[in-house]
Image (spheres, helix red, strand yellow):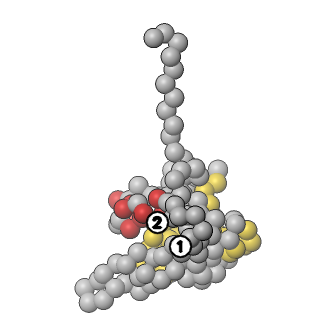
Amino acid sequence: MAGLATAVLIATPAAADDTDNLYSPQACKNPSSSTFKFHIYYNSGQNGAYRNIGYSIYDFNDAPDGVVGAQTPLTFCVINGASAPWPGSGLKIKNNAASGENEHYKYKARVYFNSGYKGAQDVMAPYQHIDRFRNVYNNNASFNWTS
């Protein structure tokens, strides 16, 4: 069939199934082995509980979950240590994150003070981390990938 072209769609971090931030097993995998390239942490210095984020999220308190009208907050993964869960395990990410790491080779990672990608922000270039957010420390509400 001459002239028939096959299109291949490649999902970028900015455009994909938003429910993956909630339901993908990549979200709570060890950050070094997750295919999700942004890691947000409860404590400074990339410590405590974390969540791997693969796609932009408009509001940490209202992560798309595939149910119309439902509101599901994005939470830190429950990470069990030797005697207790890691600090921050299971808590909401909104207004609780202290540090982050961008392992994407191409996109900048931006964490914003307000929902809707607004207000003060901390920006991480590809392969950069921030040990303690300067502008959104424990006051963070959304995340966006940008060029």
Q: Secondary structure at mark 1?
A: loop
Residue 38 x, y percent position in the rendering: 50, 62
The residue sitting at the top extreme is 2
Residue 7 x, y percent position in the rendering: 51, 29
Q: Quadrant of residue 60?
A: bottom right
Q: Is residue 17 left or right of residue 114?
A: left
| Residue found at x 69% / y 65% | 117
Of 71 and 15, which appears nearest the observer? 71
How many C-alpha atoms fall within 10 Å of the one at disc 1: few (<14), some, or many (≥20)? some
Of 93 and 126, which appears nearest the observer? 93
Q: Secondary structure at mark 2?
A: helix
| Residue found at x 52% / y 80% | 92
Of 25 and 102, which appears nearest the observer? 25
Q: Nearer the viewer, mark 1 or mark 2?
A: 1
Task: Please report contact status of discs 1 and 2: CB closer than 8 Å, yes or no.
Answer: yes
Q: Given the image, on which type of amino acid does mark 2 rest? A: Leu
| Residue found at x 30% / y 89% | 84
* In the rendered image, the vertical position of residue 11 relative to residue 114, given as above or below: above
How many C-alpha atoms fall within 10 Å of the one at disc 2: few (<14), some, or many (≥20)? many
Q: Which mark is residue 22?
A: 2
Q: Quadrant of residue 57?
A: bottom right
Q: Is residue 100 visible to the viewer in this orientation of the structure? A: yes
Q: Given the image, on which type of amino acid does mark 1 rest? A: Thr
Residue 96 x, y percent position in the rendering: 55, 82
Q: CA distance from mark 1 to mark 2?
A: 9 Å
Q: Is residue 48 visible to the viewer in this orientation of the structure? A: no
Quarter occupied by the N terminus = top left
* Marks 1 and 2, the one that precedes in the sequence: 2
* In the rendered image, the vertical position of residue 61 relative to residue 9, given as above or below: below
Residue 134 x, y percent position in the rendering: 64, 77
Of 65 and 32, which appears nearest the observer? 65
Residue under label 1: 72
